[in-house]
Every structure is written in structure tokens, then in C-alpha cells.
Amino acid sequence: QNVAVKTGYHFKFDFKTKGNMFGSRDGIRLTPTFDFVSKDGKTRVPVDLYYSTNQRSFIRIGSAEDQVKRFVILNDRLRQVPSEQLRDTATYKYNRYGEIHPGMMSERTYQEYYRDKFTKMKTPVGGYSLLLMPEQLRTFIGPKTNIPTNASADVLRANAAIQQWYGEYSLPAEPYVVQAGTNLAEYGRTHGGLDAKSPIFLKNGYIVVNFNLESIQEGNLGAPHLQYIHAPLMNQWLLEGFQRQVEDSYGNSFTLRDGDVVFYHADRSSRDDFSAQVPH
């Protein structure tokens, strides 16, 4: 019964990259897609998600009208990013990015500024249909000891060679779920209109969010650097032992696909938890 999250609630996530992903214009592109799975786990279909705002009804996620902006704060209290990661990242940026000129501030002062101000700013990351995670959401977690003693190796470079990225995502609080490719406007025109109770909307099941992760170097969105699922020689989900078969507490079995990250209830919203109630 604890397999899913109510729509509207966000979930936090983090992952690691290795290698040359420490530049100021490096980042991660994350493309969500959505499926609907019945509560017994037996059927799964690709779906489109719609939501409404005060100004407009039935906006499809990924359409031109889908203009909701998302922001992430790296040093959020509930995220609990280790202070050592923040200090090490600030040290690298101070010494290697050239943002701070000698005499502007000391390394210690910059570390404090990075920890207390910079990492608590809202970082724009995109919307419901696409996340672009920039360097503001990355920390460095590579080794700082037992570094090889050669000309090309140093402590800062080694520490920056493994990166940790922090993000979060959510669905709208009250999404409308239809099979992918459905012409919702045409359905409404031919069925006397649309509302939340229209039978075309899928409700008795779960919305599965699937992430396609790609690393971006030097801001080159046209040529992603690495790919988590569809790489030429390997599949990172397979390599890391992703469990493709799970069972809920009722004994229902669900087949997962590479990239599945979370189940949302298609019929339960975070707004249910904040509705006005009258005591009896």
C-alpha cells in the first residue's frame, strides 16, 4: 500500500557522475515520460498528462502552453547535503573557475558565501517536461587522499572527478491522465464537453514517471556526452542491478522498465491532505 506518492508531492533524488563533468557549463538533461499502470499491475500504457491553472484548462505537459517553471535549492534543509561536499565544491570553484579574483575575498570567505548564500538560492531547472540541471546543483565527492604523484594529478582535480547531483521533481497536484496521442479537444467537442469526471481519464491505477538521463558537456545540448539507458555499449540500469519486478503489499506484481523512478497515485492528490473538514 506504500508503493506510490500522491500527485502534487515532490520527491528528491540524487545521482553520481564520473570523469570530466566538473566544468562550469556541464550539466544533466533529464527527460520525463509517463505511463499508466493498473492497480493490479497487469496493464501498462503510455499516457499524456494534462493539468489546469486559474487561467487555462487542460494544458498538456510538454505543449507550448505548458509554462510552469521549476526551481531547486541545493542546500535545502531536508536535503542534508554534507557540509564537506559544499566546502570541497567551493574550494574547487574558488581556485579553478576564475570567478573570484585575488583580493576580492579569501578562500574561507568564499566557502562561507557559497554555503550560506549561493547554495540557498533558487536554481531554475525547467518544467514538468524537461529538467536541465546546471552546475549549481552539483557537488564534488572524489578522493582527496592517496592521489598518484604525477604531473597531471592534484587533490583538487581528483576531488572534482566524481560529482554528485541533487534534484527534485513532482507532478501537478491534479493531473488528468489519458492514453498518449489522445485528441482531448476533439473528445470534448464530440462528447458534450470535458470535466474531471469524464470517462476518458484514467484513474484506477498509478502514473509511472520514467527518467531519461543524459550528461551535457560545455552546454552542448545537441550532442549529449553520456546516456544512462540507450548507450551504445552498456546500460547503467542493468549494470547497477535495477530490480525489474516488484510486488506491493497486496501481492500485485509490477514489471518495471529501465528509467522508472516513482509511482504516483492517479486518483489521490496532495490536495486531499489539505481540504477543509467539518468536525461532527
Image: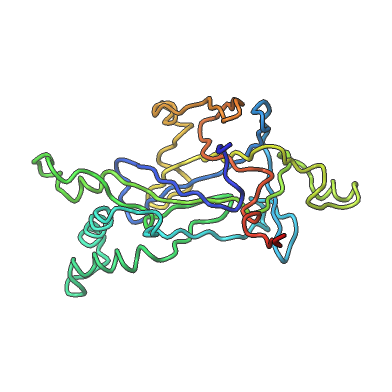
Whether 136 is drawn above or below 197: the answer is: below
Q: Position of residue 109 (x, y in %)?
A: 21, 70
Between 165 and 20, the one nearer to me in the picture: 165
Viewer-side residue, 39 vs 218: 39
In the displayed orientation, state which residue is furthest to the left. Answer: 149
Q: Of 24 and 267, which appears nearest the observer?
A: 267
The colour scheme is rainbow
Q: Which residue lies furthest to the front in this view?
A: 280
Q: Which residue is drawn at 33% across and 53% down?
A: 81
Q: Is residue 63 left or right of residue 94?
A: right
Residue 237: x percent and y percent? 44, 30
On screen, residue 65 above or below 147: below
Total number of numbered discs in the rendering: 0
Asked whether, in this view, residue 143 is left or right of residue 6, the answer is left
The answer to which quarter of the image holds residue 106 is bottom left
Give the quarter of the image for residue 51.
Answer: bottom right
Quadrant of the snapshot with the C terminus = bottom right
Q: Answer with the quarter of the image where residue 59 lies.
A: bottom right
What residue sits 27% from the left and 53% below the top? 85
**Can you say which quadrant of the picture contains the N terminus?**
top right
Q: Is residue 260 above or below residue 221?
A: above
In depth, the one of 46 and 40 nearer the eye is 40
Residue 61 is situated, as x and y percent measured from the top left of the image, at: 65, 51
Q: In this view, does 187 lie to the left or right of 266?
A: right
Residue 68 image point, x, y percent = 60, 60
Which residue is at a point 57% across and 30% down the rendered structure image?
248
